[in-house]
Amino acid sequence: MARFFMAGTNLLGSPTAIIRGRDAEHIQVLRLRPGEDVTICDTQGSDYKCRLVRADKEEAELEIIEVVPCKGEPSVSVTVLCGLPKGDRVDYIIQKSVEAGAHDIVFFKSARCIARPEDPYKKLERWNRISEEAAKQCGRGIIPKVSWAEDYGEVLNTAVHKDLALFMYETGEREPLNRVLDSNPGITSVSVITGPEGGFDAYEADLARLSGLHICSMGERILRCETAPVVALTAIMYATGNLS
Amino acid sequence: MARFFMAGTNLLGSPTAIIRGRDAEHIQVLRLRPGEDVTICDTQGSDYKCRLVRADKEEAELEIIEVVPCKGEPSVSVTVLCGLPKGDRVDYIIQKSVEAGAHDIVFFKSARCIARPEDPYKKLERWNRISEEAAKQCGRGIIPKVSWAEDYGEVLNTAVHKDLALFMYETGEREPLNRVLDSNPGITSVSVITGPEGGFDAYEADLARLSGLHICSMGERILRCETAPVVALTAIMYATGNLS
């Protein structure tokens, strides 16, 4: 079924919805006819099941049949925080993390980052466009926000304010991810920190440990920096019953 | 620690190992000195912990200290069978499936494949090189074999000869993946079939069902064809205790 995002819309209580601009044109392109079903997502996790009343190039009017929670939204809100990798690995992490169910994605510069972002803030618009495209494509109920954290302290502070805060690390003393997840049932928010190509410096792991994060292992295989977030997200979705 | 694959080698019982050719040159490039530790993987799942005795451009002699099972190998053998996608999605599926712990990867042409392989057998050498590179990089104990299945019957036949056979499908009556995995403890071999860009035709799912495969869902989000294998593999690794 055709699916459109209407960010910030509150259609609750309203009998009809009006779609304008690019989405109205898109409805024309899709050759949708009056009486056909269309879903409007309010990007807050609610799906508005609608029926098309009329449509032209400028606008489309839809009758709202019912409002339901978007099935594409997991019951757990996962914030993914990644040491900035090089080039298209960033795009990849955004696209796959959105598919895997991330609530939001934060990039930051860590000690061993090879990437040298001139001005990461300039990239945010493009990064968030990638998130929106992925969200539409896989049927999410929100558009996961992509942001930039100025320093590592900010990253740790964001991480520790979740029900469960995880730091993926390749060496030293670590807790198995499955044990940490199984021993924390009923969590509704999780943060996951993963490193750049070069991994994390020992002091970054020490700081995470001191801040109260769980230093976790995801098995003996060394995952690439762009693979770790989607594997961690999938494990969390599996453990919280969101992969069924 | 430096890691080398010596395919088909049986070093068992032998006190020393000789490395020649490219790997010997690589040892030179790495500037490894006598006395330093080197791991030789026999690509059968065993790691030979060695100490370098001597090395020049032609060959390197190593003293074998001990033979241990490769920690990078999961306890469950997963065969991934994918409807052939377009272009570099294939490379991506191979690399990520190897990282996620696949035992072997099979591509096949399904009803809705967009990709039109002239001669897939010509591509096998390149596909297997991608697998070997990924296996070295992430510390696998084997080099997962990439192969081509001639027809769908062969695919289903391969799939049903595992302890558990899974068919990932987006619509209709499906079993939640986590329920299937949780109700099949102690499995040592699993097959996972995933579709190409366009997904599977209904008759392909029906045939899989009739063949005894579990038709599974991985949540309400629609995963891209190159994302589904790594998500399914991660769920299986998590459920079988191989993500810790």
Image: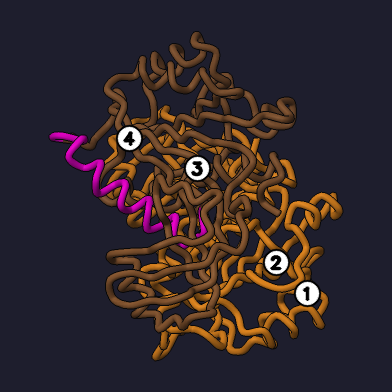
Chain colours: A orange, B brown
User: In the rendered image, which residue does mark 2 sit on?
Assistant: A191
Compute the Cα span from label 1 to label 4.
45 Å
Q: Residue at x 36, y 15 (%)?
A: B153
Q: Which mark is on residue B102?
A: 3
- Read off the residue under disc 4: B147
The reply to whether residue A10 is visible in this rendering is no
Q: Are marks 1 and 2 in contact (CB under 8 Å)?
A: yes
Secondary element at image label 2:
strand
Q: Secondary structure at mark 3?
A: loop
Say which element carries label 4.
Answer: strand
Q: Which residues are magenta?
A: B118-140
Marked residue chain, label 4: B
Around disc 2, counting alpha carbons within 10 Å, would you say few (fewer than 14), some (14 to 19), or many (20 or more)?
many
Tag 1's secondary structure? helix
Task: Name the front one of labels 1 and 4.
Answer: 4
The circle drawn on residue A160 is: 1
* Residue type, label 1: Val
Q: Furthest-top residue in view? A: B210
Rounded to the nearest angstrom, the CA distance separating label 4 from label 2 is: 38 Å
Q: Residues within 10 Å of mark 1 (few under 14, many from 20)?
A: some
Report crowding for label 4: few under 14, some 14 to 19, many 20 or more residues within 10 A (C-alpha).
some
